[in-house]
Amino acid sequence: MSGLPLFGFFRRMLGQDQAFIRAIATITGRTPSNVRLYRLAFTHSSVVRQQGEQGRQQSNERLEFLGDAVLGTVVAEYLFRKFPYEQEGFLTEMRSRIVNRESLNALALKLGLDKLVQLDPGQGRAARSRSVNGNALEALVGAVYLDQGYKAARRFVLGRIVKPYVDVKSMTQTTANFKSKLIEWAQRNGRVLRYELSGEPRPGGVMEFSATVLLDEEAVATGMGLSKKQAEQLAAERALEVLGV
Amino acid sequence: MSGLPLFGFFRRMLGQDQAFIRAIATITGRTPSNVRLYRLAFTHSSVVRQQGEQGRQQSNERLEFLGDAVLGTVVAEYLFRKFPYEQEGFLTEMRSRIVNRESLNALALKLGLDKLVQLDPGQGRAARSRSVNGNALEALVGAVYLDQGYKAARRFVLGRIVKPYVDVKSMTQTTANFKSKLIEWAQRNGRVLRYELSGEPRPGGVMEFSATVLLDEEAVATGMGLSKKQAEQLAAERALEVLGV
């Protein structure tokens, strides 16, 4: 008779696991092999720290590091093929619009990942941070990559995230719009528009550019980015806000 | 008889192509299928601009964008597996030490890519830039990825670049050394050592950290990085330089 409660315990565990496996299969389109990886993908650091065994039990941060890279590669190839005549600067900017923190958080919510994330709500700032879900999405991509390989991760990213939820076409239009909108505004209002650019090397060998919008030689707004174009776009976007256009 | 010079032309073209194909096969370990991709990987923008057909003939910049992502993913997975107990910050820092501009340039020279790069030496700064070879290496990874798939690109990066030429072990040691070396120096010289940290959000949703080394509350050196640890390491490294240690 002593076995019965234990049996119930295992059955509950198994039931939980089955529900989790079903959820992952629905989200990724494939039944997971190594379920532990997916559990890890949804383990926020607040839960691990709470248990006070730092260095032992892991959080999803390492998987997030890996998934971020995989996601970046899949989206890079997608844009590379979709825009055969666009320059590198355009591709870089488009990718950062797709995989930036805010966008990833929104995508994670669309996939319902917030219902799977394990976090300690009592942990304040870190656990309430809005990037929790976006980070879990990256970690999930990392888990699919390790569990099923690159091709499956690519299929997941394109088939379940980018194609259903990212409106690349309208993104292209917004991209082009801020700078030309500002030019139009300056022309209508008889103002002289000029950008001041500077670049600074950053760790990791990348350059970071800073663009300042000058109207009649007066600085209105500044934007930063990893390409000149990106910096100018951001500066133009902010200038339009400042001007209330 | 009029066919003979033309035949000679084709034979020379074919000879050049054969030599190029052999060079690529030696470097990557696989005979290329789509040779055009590899030609593109070695086409520096100075050659394209020289021909004045911008937008038509392409340079290797788009392939570089793609290859940079593939390289980042392969190295991320390699470090993820090699250091199962290290945190995300360590992995990020190690990766940036492997794939930074200087390191890529050195690796490109070891592979002999400088002999394949097509550039216009008359074009001044851009063509003479030291990143030409490192950029070609990234573009080559992009070409292998498109031509042979992810697995082949991964095999190329690990088997022909990382494992033969990157001394990951000694890199780990250097990583740990700057901060502890500075602590030792401060203790020996009876100085109070402290780091001042600040973080700033950057486009693309990342945070950039700045660390300043203070000795007896006097700022000695500052470092920036995408993690606190990375910023502190760089600040410590620079402080040691300033102090002549």
Image: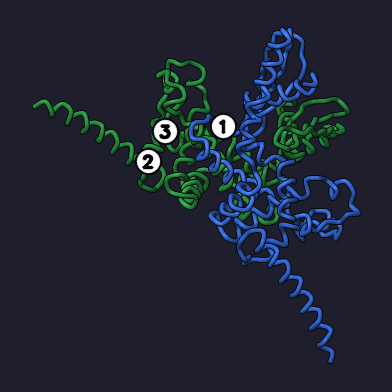
Chain colours: A blue, B green
Residue depicted at x 83% and y 56%: A119
Circle nearer the N terminus (1, 3): 3
- Residue B177: x, y in percent? 70, 41
Give the quarter of the figure containing the N terminus of chain A. Answer: bottom right
How many numbered marks, from 0 up?
3
Question: Disc 1 on helix, strand or loop?
Answer: helix
Kind of residue sitting beneath label 3? Leu
Circle nearer the N terminus (3, 2): 2
Q: Nearer the viewer, residue A245 or B189?
A: A245
In this rendering, the label closer to the viewer, 1 or 2: 2
Distance of label 3 from label 2 (alpha carbons): 13 Å
Badges 3 and 2: C-beta atoms under 8 Å apart?
no
- Residue A204: x, y in percent? 64, 34
Question: Disc 2 on helix, strand or loop?
Answer: helix
Residue depicted at x 33% and y 40%: B21
- Residue A124: x, y in percent? 90, 49
Give the residue at mark 3: B40
Work out whether disc 1 and disc 3 sit on a shared chain.
Answer: yes
Give the residue at mark 2: B24
Circle nearer the N terminus (1, 2): 2
Give the residue at mark 1: B102
- Residue B88: x, y in percent? 71, 48
Residue depicted at x 65% and y 20%: A180
